[in-house]
Every structure is written in structure tokens, then in C-alpha cells.
Image (cartoon, rainbow, N blue to C red):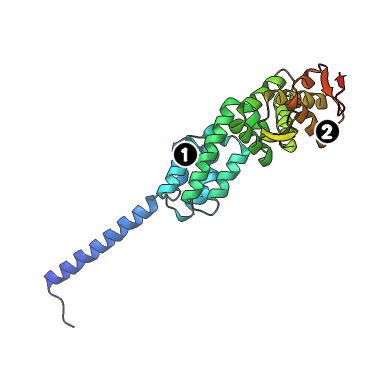
């Protein structure tokens, strides 16, 4: 067998050592590489309580730009993350191990809306936050009917368990369809007009909710809707002042 020249043997040995060294470096790098980059990033930003929300994103052991944006968004939205419905929405987006631009946009809007509600009405956000329908009704009121929500809150402020009662009042408003514009009869023209629920209506609903808490039997939704509509037609009904009406023959009657 022909023996390789000494110089060639040395060259081969050096090449082998280089390959071994390169392999060792790769192994070391692989061993040191962060296998949970999203959780590590979240931990650094103070999200220890919410690591489970981003854990599915670490299945591929990588963090892409959208995932990085999401983690940083969550870090800016810790107050909103106290709400169970919000956490559920985040987990719905991350559960499949990836985040799409549409999901990120949706979560950004939801976290902003929920954060605004939680900042102004923290206990309301907490008391409605486990009920998807009720929480989104509160969100809707806070955005589209802020004065209505504020009047509800003021009317119930002095009551015990006010946040639970406020949640109950919001549920009643939603059940009656008063979280959006409603058709109200105009007695002068005899036609229906679109109107925004008034703060006075909020007082009626708040007082009725308080009465229910004191044991008043629940009326039918139809009766309650008529009461709300009547209040918006003539505020004096709420104040229990006498109301003057004319019948079909023109005779004047006083009710009250």
C-alpha cells in the first residue's frame, strides 16, 4: 500500500480537525439556541402570567416578525389581559402556532377597546369579562353610547354590588335592543323615528334593575320595551308627572 506523503497527511489531518471543530461549533450553537424565543421575549417584557398565550408560537422554535409584534402588543396591553374573554381571543389566534396579519390587526383593535373600558370601568370589565356576549355589549355601549353607560353607572353607583348590577342592567338593555338606535313613535306625526337611547332611559333601566334586586317580579320584555319607548316619547312618564292626552274625539284626559 502506498503511503501518502507526510505533507499530504498533515493537510488531511488539518482538514479533519477543521471539520470536527465546525461540527462542534454547530452543536454548541444548537445547544445554546433559544428553543422558546416568544416565551423568552414575553418573560423579558413582564408577561410571566401570560406565557401560555404565546407558548404555541414556539412550536417551530422560531420568532417571526409578526410574532414579535404580538408579544410586544401584549406587553403594552396588560390591563386588557386581565379580562378572560380577551385572553381567550389571544389564545384563539396563537393556538395553531402562527399569527396572520389579519389576526394581529383584530387583536390590536380588541386590546385597545378592552383596555379603554378597563381603564374607565375596571370593575365592570372584570364583572362582564367572563361572559363573551355581555362583555361585548359593554364594549359596544362604551364606544357607541358612552353617555348611556355613564348614566347607568351613576344611577347604580350607590348600590351594593354595583358592578354586578351594572352588568345586569347592560344585559337588560341588550335584551331589549336598547344598545343601538331604536324606532320610537312620534305622537305628532304618528310615524316611527330612529332615536338614540337617552340617558333618561338609562335611569329607567337602572332603577328597574335595582328594583329587581330588591325582589320586584320580572315583567315581560314587551312591557319593558313599551315603558322604555314611552319614556323616550314623553320624559314626564319617568318622573310620574300627570300626562295630558287627547282621545280620538278630541277630549282631553289627564293620566297620573
Q: Nearer the viewer, residue 15 or 180?
A: 180
Query: Where 54 sits versus 205, above or below?
Result: below
**Quadrant placement of the N terminus:** bottom left
SS assignment at label 2? helix
Q: Which residue is mark 2?
A: 223
Q: Nearer the viewer, residue 253 or 203?
A: 253
Of circles 2 and 1, which is in front?
2
Pointer 2 local density, CA inside 10 Å: few below 14, some 14–19, many at least 20? few
Q: Which callout, 2 or 1, points at the residue further toward the start of the chain?
A: 1
Q: Which residue is at 15% across, 76% downward? A: 4
Q: Which residue is at 16% across, 67% downward? A: 11
**Residue 129 drawn at (x, y percent):** 65, 36
Q: Which residue is at 64% across, 24% downward? A: 150
Q: Quadrant of residue 198?
A: top right
**Residue 215 drawn at (x, y percent):** 86, 26
Q: Nearer the viewer, residue 186 or 109?
A: 186
Q: Which residue is mark 1?
A: 73
Q: Quadrant of residue 20?
A: bottom left
Amino acid at each position: 500500500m502506498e503511503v501518502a506523503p507526510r505533507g499530504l497527511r498533515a493537510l488531511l489531518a488539518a482538514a479533519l480537525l477543521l471539520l470536527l471543530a465546525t461540527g462542534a461549533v454547530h452543536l454548541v450553537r444548537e445547544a445554546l439556541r433559544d428553543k422558546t424565543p416568544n416565551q423568552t421575549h414575553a418573560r423579558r417584557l413582564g408577561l410571566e402570567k401570560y406565557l401560555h398565550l404565546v407558548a404555541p408560537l414556539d412550536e417551530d422554535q422560531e420568532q417571526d416578525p409578526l410574532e414579535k409584534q404580538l408579544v410586544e402588543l401584549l406587553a403594552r396591553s396588560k390591563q386588557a389581559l386581565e379580562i378572560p374573554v380577551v385572553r381567550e381571543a389571544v389564545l384563539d389566534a396563537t393556538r395553531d402556532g402562527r399569527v396572520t396579519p389579519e389576526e394581529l390587526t383584530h387583536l390590536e383593535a380588541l386590546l385597545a377597546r378592552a383596555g379603554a373600558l378597563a381603564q374607565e370601568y375596571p370593575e365592570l370589565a372584570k364583572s362582564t369579562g367572563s361572559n363573551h356576549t355581555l362583555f361585548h355589549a359593554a364594549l359596544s355601549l362604551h364606544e357607541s353610547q358612552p353617555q348611556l353607560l355613564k348614566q347607568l353607572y351613576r344611577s347604580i353607583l350607590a348600590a351594593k354590588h354595583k358592578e354586578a348590577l351594572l352588568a345586569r342592567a347592560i344585559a337588560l338593555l341588550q335584551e331589549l335592543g336598547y344598545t343601538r338606535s331604536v324606532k320610537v313613535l312620534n305622537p305628532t306625526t304618528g310615524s316611527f323615528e330612529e332615536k338614540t337611547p337617552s340617558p333618561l332611559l338609562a335611569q329607567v333601566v337602572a332603577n328597574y334593575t335595582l328594583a329587581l334586586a330588591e325582589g320586584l317580579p320580572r315583567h315581560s320584555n314587551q312591557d319593558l320595551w313599551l315603558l322604555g319607548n314611552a319614556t323616550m316619547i314623553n320624559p314626564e312618564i319617568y318622573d310620574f308627572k300627570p300626562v295630558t292626552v287627547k282621545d280620538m274625539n278630541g277630549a282631553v284626559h289627564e293620566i297620573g
